[in-house]
Amino acid sequence: MDVLTLSRIQFGLTIGFHYIYPPLSIGLGVMLVLIEASWLKTKNEVYHQMAKFWTNIFALTFAMGVATGLVMEFEFGTNWASYSRFVGDIFGSALAAEGIFAFFLEAGFLAVLLFGWDKVGPKLHFFSTCMVCLGAHFSAVWITVANSFMQTPAGYHLVGSEMHKRAEVTNFWDMVMSPSSGDRLFHTLCGAWMAGAFLVVSVSAYYLLKKRHEDFAWRSLQLALPVALIASIVQGISGDMSAREVAKWQPAKLAAFEGLYNTESNAPLAIVGYVDEKDHKVEGLEVPDLLSFLTYHDPHATVTGLDSFPPEDWPPVESCFMFFHGMVAIGSALLLISALGCYYLRRKKLADKRWLLWILVFSVLGPEIANQLGWYAAEVGRQPWIVWHMMRTPMGLSAVVRANTVLTSLILFTFIYFLLGALFIYLLNHKIQTGPHPDDLVPHGKLAIPHLTTDEYSI
């Protein structure tokens, strides 16, 4: 393979593996805030036990996120030096803002969150938890801002000679608030909230099936299932907003998502199917007029197809179609699963639905897969541009990097990431199998609450 293909595979591998962990950290941060708030409000020591257990899980995901994210910083300078030179002012300002406003905030309070249980008061510890959660969200803000510039550039001008042009910030806030930043950030955060909530749901359902830590499991489900349902609903709304933003600013990407080769009014929406790239059509089940309605709220509106653009500017249609529709399908399934879980929990019948509990156990995979598919859809849909209509992807490569060098590092990265992934699964499984510690029910010498029955748990 050539150096371009290998470099793209390498970057896709490293960022794809890294992206497993930040959504979990952001989502678990929200759950920790809710759990500690419940503890402060009710004085129910089960919530204290929950807070300590999920803090340990959060620490594991945070550590893995930091370790796997460092590699990408170096890849910008090694494999993609021309790109880094072109957008260095843009990325530099956004990543510097992340370090100042996000990482320092998150890392500064992380020590109190992890080790301050018996050293600071409950209210100060809760404040630290809120700051760590806020820092994780700020990190998502600035990373999304940097990536959104690649999708919809704004707040810049080009300087330098024809052969050595680079983008320079002219208005920082215009760059931050580029046309796609808000919708993309909202969509990203919703996916992270789902990832954290469904992780809590999965572990709790597992404990109920095994009849272990039942007080802990019921209380966890009582908090996490509504969060999963709300996040799933809001994710659908944010997805609609994001798709209409794509239709406005990146119509070729939307056409690839939907396999729409021809510009047409009353455009149909493909529900299931596959792309026949040879004959330029989608084979499968389509709903007439629905794409026009969803995009412009008008069933007769004209939707731009790929025929409006030169073929050399088309994204890989089949890949975009499958990534996008896979993400939508999983998101819809998670909405249904969380709605069923909330329904039976409210009716106090969830314990009897072992089939649903097993589905909830494996539901943790849904947000992770959907987040990956969404990221790949967004980035592959941007092709052949590394910066939309400003720089093509091959032009971003480093001039001196050779294919054999990239291949060697790709093999090494794959091996190391395999070990890191195995280590993460082992440690996570160990913490889950060990479960919450009984002593966490009696902080500061207080007595534990009496055992609670399943009838006391409802939304």
Image: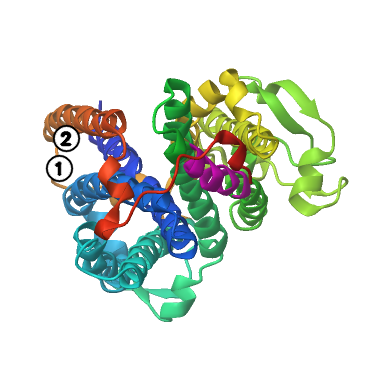
Region rendered in magenta: 218-230
Q: Is residue 287 above or below residue 62?
A: above
Q: Under tag 2, what secondary structure?
A: helix
Q: Is residue 306 left or right of residue 415?
A: right
Q: Position of residue 171 (x, y in %)?
A: 43, 81
- Residue drawn at x 48%, y 76% is 174
Tell me if residue 223 is in the magenta stretch.
yes
Q: Under tag 1, what secondary structure?
A: loop
Around disc 1, counting alpha carbons within 10 Å, would you say few (fewer than 14), some (14 to 19), or many (20 or more)? some
- Residue drawn at x 69%, y 41% is 305
Q: Is residue 85 left or right of residue 144?
A: left
Find disc 1 in the rendering and name its residue. 401
Q: Which quadrant would residue 403 be assigned to in this image?
A: top left
Q: Amino acid at mark 2?
A: Val
Tell me if residue 158 is in the magenta stretch.
no
Looking at the rendered structure, the number of numbered marks drawn on it comes to 2
Name the mark on residue 406: 2
Q: Amino acid at mark 1?
A: Val
